[in-house]
Amino acid sequence: MQSTPLLANILAASPHIDPVFLDAQVVSCAALDVELGCTLSAQDETCNPIGSFKGRGTELFAATALRSGERVVCASAGNFGQGLARAAAKRGHACTVFVGASANPLKVDAMRRFGADVRIGGPDFDAAKRAAREHAAMHGLCFVEDGAHAAIAEGAGTIGLELAASARFETILVPLGNGALLAGVAVALRDRAPDVRIVAVVAANAPAMKLSLEAGRAVNTCTADTVADGIAVREPIAATLTFLRGCCDEVVAVSEQQIVDAMRLLHRCLGRAFEPAGAVGVAAILARRECHAGRRVATIFCGANVAPDLRARLFPDRCSLASHQALSSTGIHR
């Protein structure tokens, strides 16, 4: 990271963050506990204008790290771009977001609604990141890299403070993409709940972060072919890896089928459609039930912006595209 996340900055972050992103509900469900064989507390970060936790970090970054009128550029799978576009527009900053050609169209449309100039930067997220970085350098703009700036992780760290204050748990399962969520939550929990075991979760089809943390160096992969677009990383940020290695006790990988099974289970028990990256914590429980049996476990439902084709395939009876679009038009992605 350009600097490491600091507990003091996490503790001081909330006044800089739009309250719509704070004090998220912690969800529990007896039926879900029976299915999983453990007691689950899940912080639901989806009932806000971007349907994702990303607004916490982008709000803090825009409020504390940008100069007046500074123009920003980023790459995004969708949720980070929404958060940065919204935070930038509120403060008078122009925002350009580069996306991969396969980006979730709902997320792309949302970024545009929040004021972003959205451009295709290649076939996938990592190609879009290279295009964004080159564009920023060419035009003298501020390149904002999700996972590389301490303020973005510190905003996410407020989730750890809230969870520690509202739930008791022995293990937390944290979705791992570029690492801002893991870094921020870990800094908060190492202070507030030091005995909690922190487990990072990646998709088995996008294992670059797991391979890199285990090897102690950046390990790129040729593809990141997973339904979980929010954690589909194939080129880790090398500068963050040393810090991230101390942020978790273990990294586990979940299969595509386990991710889909988790999404369906959450929909059946909670009546909610969480996006694949938002469900990987539950997928990790399904993958290793014996590790969590009878224990108190936490996770983070970090996003709920499900691509229309995936929604239609997984939830044909109760989640019509029409009803989803109606919700999207209000700015709330439930």
Image: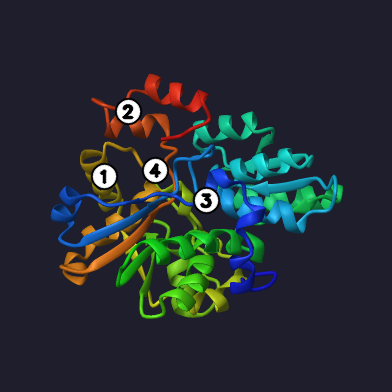
Pick whichever, 308 or 40, lies toward us.
40
Choose mark 4 or mark 2, whichever is in front: 4
- Tell me the kind of residue under disc 3: Leu
- Label 4, on which residue? 275
- Label 3, on which residue? 22
Inter-mark Cα distance, 4 to 1: 11 Å
Locate the C terminus by quadrant: top left
- Label 1, on which residue? 266
Q: Position of residue 176 (x, y in %)?
A: 45, 61
Q: Name the residue rendered at 16%, 68% in the picture.
A: 294
Q: Earlier in the sequence, mark 1 or mark 3?
A: 3
- Rendered position, 246 above or below 21: below
- Tell me the kind of residue under disc 1: Leu
- Element type at marker 3? loop
The answer to which quarter of the image holds residue 122 is top right
- Element type at marker 4? loop
Q: Position of residue 269 (x, y in %)?
A: 21, 42
Q: Earlier in the sequence, mark 3 or mark 2?
A: 3
Q: Position of residue 278 (x, y in %)?
A: 39, 49
Choose mark 3 or mark 2, whichever is in front: 3
- Element type at marker 2? helix
- Is 65 displayed left or right of 138 in the figure? left
For the question of whether residue 11 can be seen, the reply is yes
- Is 171 displayed left or right of 135 in the figure? left
Inter-mark Cα distance, 4 to 2: 13 Å
Q: Earlier in the sequence, mark 4 or mark 2?
A: 4
Q: Name the residue rendered at 44%, 43% in the picture.
A: 46
- Element type at marker 1? helix
